[in-house]
């Protein structure tokens, strides 16, 4: 799962770290005649496609989703509209060229991608590439609603599903009717069709012997694609791909590999195990060796529990602790409120409150504090986060502020952990500071 969503400043990110609770082991199925078939399903241009459901007049047009709801969005605001949303005239939609600020694109329709714009690009940069694109603000609750809906369709058909975030899942096809037919294509088609019928959304599916290959395969024929990869397809279909296509090889590892003359997965497969371990260490080297051969034993993770929940915001302009005290204070309070709302909505309480700052020079710092009692209360979080803030230098202007609540437990009715919580370690409590009533902002 990835960086997620924007709110009424520029980019408020909701993040959740998760730990494995229940794993499903489909590898050692006794005496199974069936071969392991794992699907990766990823929704097509997800946020944009959800928006197009309520604004169908934008179909086929370049549309980007990003930034927060602004004054310019009043004419298209679902809450302020009297006429049906599909009747709003195209001229009433804000255009990318009129945007000013630091917002980034969360996603773009395929029509917009042809102009070279895409996820994570600054909106103002994107405006130079595709000024005529229509710009819609992010509406995370709406995307969450559709995320739940498409996942419910899947588990109705194929119950063993690993949730990988808002728009992607792994599905174990091995024992599901149709999951073996045509390498899984029959079941993939059924799921794709049912999701479309029930939500109006399209997706792409890759079916392969394991998660590693399925994840690559789902990208092969996007959008609305189905790709089947069999073990014997390794050389023809996987080896020509760039190493970056392996989920787990990021830009840094890719640059290092390129420095060693390795560009494709096939190049990687030419290297022997000792060579890879010499260059990348035991763990990564051994993992690369297997990945290049399409080997991956990871089971599906069927249930996971969040370890922490956080929100962060990048400001429209850099803010200074003294000069912009009131504005920073309001943003800080809002972030704490949002984290508290997230905790309550998801049914968790937490004990470790942390902050993150990024300075104008892009350097970041974090601080945290562990409380005596679990909480999901905005005021308590705000107070504790305020104390953390006192422990960081604030001479330099800030470009980002974040609040995090960790050491989570499921909440009981008294808003304390349901099951007895483990004792807080000394190391964690040592990060705490004495309570004080004067807050910085
Ligand atoms: N997202 C985001 N910021 C990013 C990348 C993605 O907020 N840097 C959000 C918006 C996307 C959603 O997550 O709609 C899913 O991410 P994907 O990478 O799957 O992108 P899309 O679904 O938009 O497009 P694709 O058809 O390529 O999957
Ligand atoms: Mg997607």
Image (cartoon, helix red, strand yellow):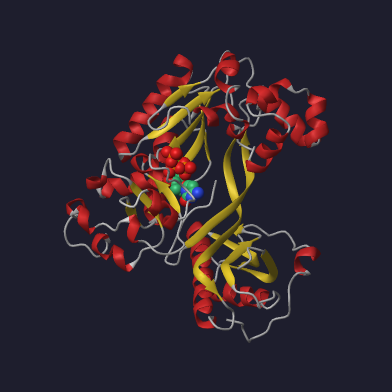
Quadrant for residue 78, please give it: bottom left
Report the front residue among 224 and 157: 224
Q: Residue at x 36, y 63 (%)?
A: 69
Up-down: is 373 above or below 239?
Answer: below
Report the front residue among 228 and 273: 273
Quadrant for residue 393, please give it: bottom right
Report the front residue among 243 and 202: 243
Residue 424 picture location, percent across and down = 74, 63
Residue 131 picture location, percent across and down = 34, 52
Q: Is residue 331 left or right of residue 436?
A: left
Quadrant for residue 27, please give it: top right
Report the front residue among 365 and 418: 365
Residue 259 picture location, percent across and down = 71, 35
Q: Residue at x 58, y 22 (%)?
A: 240
- Residue at far bottom of view: 438
Q: Is residue 423 left or right of residue 385?
A: right
Q: From this viewpoint, is residue 178 visible?
A: no
Residue 231 picture location, percent across and down = 59, 16
Up-down: is 193 above or below 6?
Answer: above
């Amino acid at each position: 799962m990835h960086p997620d969503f924007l709110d009424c400043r520029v980019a408020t990110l909701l993040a959740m770290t998760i730990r494995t609770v229940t794993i499903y082991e489909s590898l050692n199925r006794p005496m199974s005649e069936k071969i392991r078939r794992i699907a990766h399903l990823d929704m097509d241009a997800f946020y944009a496609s959800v928006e197009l459901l309520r604004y169908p007049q934008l179909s086929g047009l370049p549309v980007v989703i990003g930034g927060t709801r602004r004054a310019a969005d009043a004419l298209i605001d679902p809450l302020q509209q009297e006429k049906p949303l599909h009747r709003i005239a195209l001229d009433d939609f804000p255009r990318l060229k009129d945007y000013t600020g630091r917002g980034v694109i969360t996603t773009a329709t395929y029509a917009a991608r042809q102009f070279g714009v895409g996820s994570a690009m600054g909106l103002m940069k994107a405006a130079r590439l595709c000024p005529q694109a229509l710009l819609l603000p992010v509406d995370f609750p709406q995307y969450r609603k559709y995320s739940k809906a498409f996942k419910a369709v899947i588990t109705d058909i194929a119950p063993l599903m690993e949730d990988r975030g808002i728009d992607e899942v792994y599905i174990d096809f091995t024992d599901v009717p149709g999951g073996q037919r045509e390498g899984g294509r029959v079941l993939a088609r059924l799921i794709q069709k049912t999701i479309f019928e029930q939500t109006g959304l399209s997706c792409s599916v890759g079916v392969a012997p394991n998660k590693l290959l399925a994840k690559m395969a789902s990208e092969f024929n996007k959008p609305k694609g189905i790709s089947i990869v069999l073990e014997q397809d390794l050389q023809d279909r996987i080896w020509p791909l760039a190493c970056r296509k392996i989920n787990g090889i990021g830009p840094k590892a890719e640059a290092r590999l390129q420095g060693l003359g390795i560009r494709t997965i096939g190049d990687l497969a030419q290297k022997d195990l000792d060579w890879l371990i010499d260059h990348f260490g035991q763990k990564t080297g051994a993992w690369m060796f297997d990945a290049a051969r399409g080997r991956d034993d990871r089971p599906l993770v069927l249930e996971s529990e969040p370890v922490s929940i956080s929100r962060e915001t990048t400001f429209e302009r850099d803010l200074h602790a003294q000069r912009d005290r009131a504005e920073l204070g309001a943003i800080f309070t809002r972030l704490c409120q949002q984290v508290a709302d997230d905790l309550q909505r998801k049914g968790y309480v937490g004990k470790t409150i942390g902050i993150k700052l990024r300075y104008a020079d892009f350097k970041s710092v974090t601080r945290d504090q562990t409380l005596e009692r679990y909480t999901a209360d905005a005021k308590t979080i705000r107070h504790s986060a305020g104390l953390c803030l006192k422990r960081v230098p604030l001479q330099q202007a800030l470009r980002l502020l974040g609040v995090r609540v960790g050491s989570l437990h499921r909440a009981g009715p008294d808003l304390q952990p349901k099951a007895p919580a483990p004792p807080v370690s000394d190391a964690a409590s040592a990060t705490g500071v004495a309570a004080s009533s004067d807050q910085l902002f």
